[in-house]
Image (spheres, grey):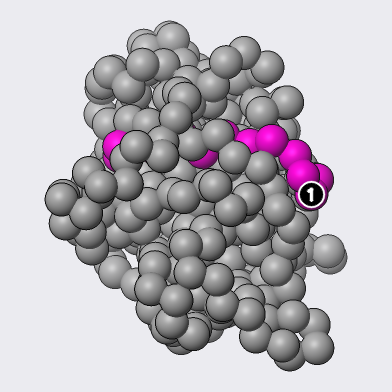
Amino acid sequence: MRVRRAFALAAAAVAAVTSVVAGAAPAQAVAAPTLASTIALSNCSASLVRYPSSVSSDRAMMLTNGHCYEGGFLAAGQVLQNRTSSRSGTLLNSTGGSLGTVRADRVLYATMTGTDVTLYRLTSTFATLQSRYGVTALTIASSRPADGSSITIPSSYWKRIWNCKIDGFVPQLREGDWTWRDSIRYDANCDTIHGTSGSPIVSASTGQVVGINNTGNDDGERCTVNNPCEVAADGTVTVSQGQSYGEQTYWFTTCLTSTRTIDLNKSGCLLTKP
């Protein structure tokens, strides 16, 4: 994968590509994108998120990639639920300044199969973070994004924002041992880099999270690590060097109970089951 692990890319290589980055990241609503509500991890990007049905007294949540899980890459077919965690990150303000440290105490859900996500429960409630830092979590959209729609990808790790568009969806995206479904393809100019792993994909029109940035083809290789390939419904394999991708996040909302917990056995739940 170009699974965007910051430690996988030398600083000099990063400097060579930063000229393609533009903008600032997403906060809420239809305002100019900012870095508000993003969270910088030691090796990846992340964001402070809520479900559409979340209430202020709920524990806040942090979203990043499955390959950013503190225990390392998850095996194909592996799913984690309600696993103890002590992950911490730095909550950023709109300009990328540090507001303070947030800590997780539980992995609510994590996998690198079907999708590439880790969702953490934080030790603080949404209300506490709002009161302490004046931040509002990004809302995970409850529906699939539209092809051609404008998106922003704010990276808390690099404190930069990519302004992009969705250029279709991939039935299967394969990389090494992993296969992802209905992946989001970006337009050709959206050249995200290592370290942007886990960045939210934010709708430019609604300010809601519609996906999570996770990979790209570095070297033009076929279906190898850091070189994902697209597999069409008829099995045709396509490789595009430099092409970048993200994964769907509305799937979380298909699995929620009335108490906002994830039930993988719920009818219509799209998240990968163990």
In this rendering, position of residue 60 left or right of residue 155? right
Residue labelled with disc 1: 147
Q: Residue furthest bottom?
A: 235
Residue in view at x 46 percent, y 16 percent? 135
Whether residue 136 is visible to the viewer of this picture, yes or no, is yes
Of residues 69 and 204, the one nearer the viewer is 204
Above or below for 86 versus 37 = below
Residue 215 position in % (x across, y down): 47, 62
Residue 270 position by quadrant:
bottom right
39 vs 252, nearest the viewer: 39
Side of 202 relative to 169 (left or right): left
Q: Position of residue 254 (x, y in %)?
A: 76, 54
Residue 155 shown in magenta:
yes
Instruction: Point out the image quarter for the C terminus.
Output: bottom right
Please name the amino acid that badge 1 sits on.
Asp
Magenta range: 146-158
Q: Is residue 210 magenta?
A: no
Q: Estimate the x, y position of residue 257 in percent, counting from the top left.
A: 74, 50
